[in-house]
Image: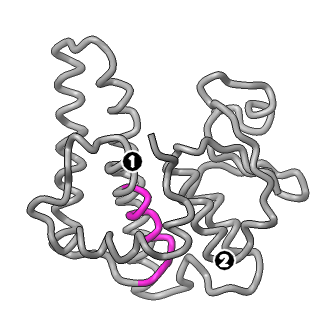
Amino acid sequence: MKLFYSATSPYVRKVMACAIARGIDGQIERVACNPHLSAADLTGQNPLSKVPTLTTEDGLALYDSPVICEFLDSIGEARPMFPEHGAARWRALKLQALGDGILDASVPRRAELAKSQDEGRIAWIARQEAIVARSLDALEADPPHHGIDIGTISIAAALGYLDFRFAHQPWREGRPRLAAWYAAIAAEPCIAATAPPPG
């Protein structure tokens, strides 16, 4: 398998954390790329020019992170990252959606902060910040469960991204339960091994 990736992408982090948790990361060849440049090797596999993009052994190109993670869950015999049924499955999928939603409100916001700030951009940034704050408050009120699955990996990737790119907007104050949960999961091997590079 071949994974087009950026080392700082939190969506790539989700994929690699799933692969590590399932013990199949050694089967993945990683190809570093800058999706903003729309290089032909990436766009030939993914017309959206986004990472992560995974090319399977039989040549099928898969994107985005929820699809890739579910595909990886079909390989090998390890405990699944996607619970098969019942309340555990729906909770994990809900947390994945919440984690991805935090990222969807944060990744483009970082780019917008670097631009000149007109009234429309300021309002848009404020809406995204409110989405993140509400999501974090919901997680404080009902912290994720312990253990590793697609839901907890997604939330860990989102909180890690906030630390990485928005350290000037600390999220832990007033959220001790969520902070304690994150401190515990950050020590899990698949989360610790996929932390973004310093700097």
Residue 197 place in picture, x, y as percent: 51, 47
Q: Amino acid at mark 2?
A: Arg
Position of residue 35 in the picture relative to residue 91 (left or right): right
Q: Quadrant of residue 88?
A: bottom left
Magenta stretch: residue 21 in it? no
Which residues are drawn in magenta? 147-158
Q: Residue furthest left?
A: 174
**Coloration of the structure image:** one colour
Picture quadrant where residue 110 is located: top left
Dividing the image into 4 quarters, which one contains the N terminus? bottom right
Tell me the residue at 12%/59% (across/down): 173
Is the residue marked by circle 2 packed among few (<14), some (14-19), or many (20+) residues within 10 Å? many
Q: Which mark is residue 83?
A: none
Reading the image, the residue beneath label 1 is: 103
Q: If you read the primary sequence from the N terminus, does the residue marked by circle 2 or circle 1 appear first?
A: 2
Describe residue 20's horizontal placement relative to residue 129 as left or right. Answer: right
Position in image of residue 7 (x %, y %): 59, 45
Please name whichever residue, 192 or 43, is drawn nearer the observer in this view of the structure: 192
Label 2 to label 1: alpha-carbon separation: 23 Å
What residue is shown with label 2? 22
**Element assignment for label 2:** loop
Quadrant where the C terminus lies? top left
